[in-house]
Structure formats: structure tokens, C-alpha cells
Amino acid sequence: MDEPPRSPVRVSDPGEMAAALPALVGFLPHESVVLVALGGAGGRRVVLTARADLPAGAGSASPVRQLVHAVGAEQPTGVLLYVVSEAADDQELLAFGPPGEVLTGLPHRALVHDLVRALAGGDVRVHDALLVRGGRWWSYDCPRPCCAPGAGTPLPGGVSEVEVAAVAAGAVVETSRGALAERIARVAGLATRAGAGRPVGPGLAVEDGWPAVLAALRLCRPGSVEPLPDAALTAVVWALTDLAVRDRALGLALGADAAAAEVLWTECTRRAPAPLDAAPATLLATAAWLRGDGAMANVALERALTSRPGYRLAELLADCLAARVHPSELRGLIADVVGGPG
């Protein structure tokens, strides 16, 4: 399940919010169910967005429990429920009435019903439940002709306040969750030892490893035209196997070199072999979450824990995200550990 960060914007129209779902989620959701939790003094501020895949079939696990758990801890004043699906309308043959008469309804209605009931059990009201399909939206509750199956209301055009806030926060909307993962897909061919000079490895001392990180960082700063050579990247990857170097590297996300550090961790994640990519992938997840990109944070954490199951720092960060630790709170925790920017 993906939990992008809170947005400071306020809800004005459910259709506008439907059009802005990619900005809230971090990618274009496909066959997904999305809950937008609302709070604030007026009860119209977005405080959390949670997404899960729609069940693939009758025997598939339902996302109801994980979604309700995700938004419940926020104690929202209410939620907006969105089903994003290209599924056709449901067709149900009536047991009573004229022979052959068919009742047409919006798809995934049973899942919507289960979610509404589960949320109500936690005293969370669903303000709107909408289907988003083919550039249009329907309300599951509206009886008017515009929301009848086969009709629908076109999604509003233009750039919404939600999208403006997301861009201002540095969010990049991908075409799918798979496209997010593709941004850090492994590139084969990186040696596990530096090609020149003294070999580096898991025994690299902190006093040697940290300068290697800083040297590579300079090549990743905005405006740098020099590519990051394999030898420099390999030195960083091995340096991060030292826990003292890795923990010190966490502090880079708090300082002026945060953007350069994220570029470095991305390159290390892409070009390092498993399980050496676990450390930079975890650092990438931390950097992404701190700047508000929860979707990338989750993708990077999955990469780290797939590459190295049980990797403790990745597990701790995953626990933070599951507990919906706000980026500002995580920033404070890191500052306590590393003593400020690296």
C-alpha cells in the first residue's frame, strides 16, 4: 500500500480532487482504490492519502483492512473514497420483474460498501465515494442521471491547487507505480571493488569511507557536468557497509546537499549489486520521504528489503512510515541520531 504524504491544500470539489489523484499519490493510479483523509479546523484539509490495488479476483485479498488502518490513526473528520478502474459496468440479471431484465450498476460496488461500513465502524464518515474511469467520474451514491452508469461527469481540466502544491514540494508524477520502480531499476555491470588505487571493501574505515562519500557527492551537485565514475560509486557503496558511515550519511538529507545526496543514492541503488544496494536504497527512501515523496519512499524501501531481507535500518524506516510519522518528525529523529547535517 502506498501512503504519500500529507498535503496542506483544502478540498473544494470531489471532481477536482479526482483529477488531482496522480499528484496526491505520486503516479497515475490504475485499478486502484484511494482514500483521501480530511481534517483540520474546517474538516476540509487533506491530511493523508492512502492507495491500494483493487482485488484482482474473487479470491484476492481485500484492501479494506489495510486502508482503514492507514487512515484511522489520523482520526480524520471524514474521507473521500475513489475507485480508479476501467472495469465495465456490472450487469445483474433480475430475479423478479420482466424476463431477461438486467440491472446495470457501477463496478466494485461491493468493495465500496465494505469500505464504507468498516470506516463507519471507526466513526469515520465517507463524504463521497466516486468511480474514476475514462476521464470521467461517477458518484456511487448520487441518483441523478449524470451519475448513472454510462454517463459520468468529465474530470475538470486545468491545474488544481493540489497539483500546484505537489509540484512546489518537488513531487514528480509518474505514469504508474512500475515507472517509479523503473527509476531505480538495477543496471548491470558495476564492479564490487574500485578499479584504481587501493581496493575498498567492507572493512573500509570511517575516516576513509566518509571522504569517498563527500567526493562522490560533489559530482552529484546541481550544475556538475562530470559523470560519476564506477570507481567513485563503488567506493561509496562499500563505505556504506560501515554503519557509522551510513548513519552519518543520513544527515546529508538535512543539509544544503540534500538534492545531491538523493542523486547519489539513486545512482548507487541503480548500479550496485544486491545486497550492497540495500543501504543506498534506504537512504534514498529517507530522502524521498523527507521531501514529501511517499510513493518513492515506499518503492525504495521495497527494493532495500527485497535485496536484503531483515535490513534493520530499512525495517525501522518502514515502521516509521507505517506509523505515519510526519516528515518533520522523521527529520527530528535523524537530527537526534546524527547531530544535524552531515
Image (cartoon, grey):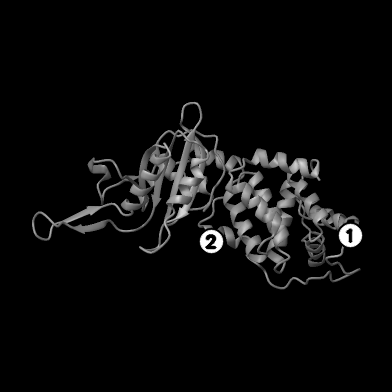
Is label 1 in a helix, a strand or a loop? loop
Neighbour tally class for label 2: few under 14, some 14-19, many 20 plus, Cα within 10 Å: few
Residue drawn 54% across the image and 48% down it? 3
Which residue occupies 58% across, 60% down?
181
Q: What residue would you read off at disc 1?
A: 205
SS label for mark 2: helix
* Residue appearing at x 82%, y 70% in the figure: 193
Nearer to us in this view, 285 or 86: 285
- Give the mark nearer the N terminus: 2 vs 1: 2
Where is mark 2, residue-wise? Answer: 178
The percent position of residue 243, horizontal first and vertical second, equals: 80, 56
Left or right: where 217 falls relative to 62: right
Say whether residue 214 is left or right of residue 152. Answer: right
Q: What percent of the width, then of the height, locates residue 312?
A: 70, 56
Side (left or right) of 113 relative to 143: right
User: What residue type is disc 1 on?
Assistant: Ala
Amino acid type indicated by mark 2:
Gly
Question: Does the image show residue 17?
Answer: yes
Q: Residues within 10 Å of mark 1 (few under 14, many from 20)?
A: some
Give the mark toward the camera: 2 or 1: 1
> Does residue 164 appear to the left or right of 122 in the view shown?
right
Q: Residue furthest top?
A: 41
Q: Name the disc covering residue 330, or none.
A: none
Q: Residue furthest left?
A: 98
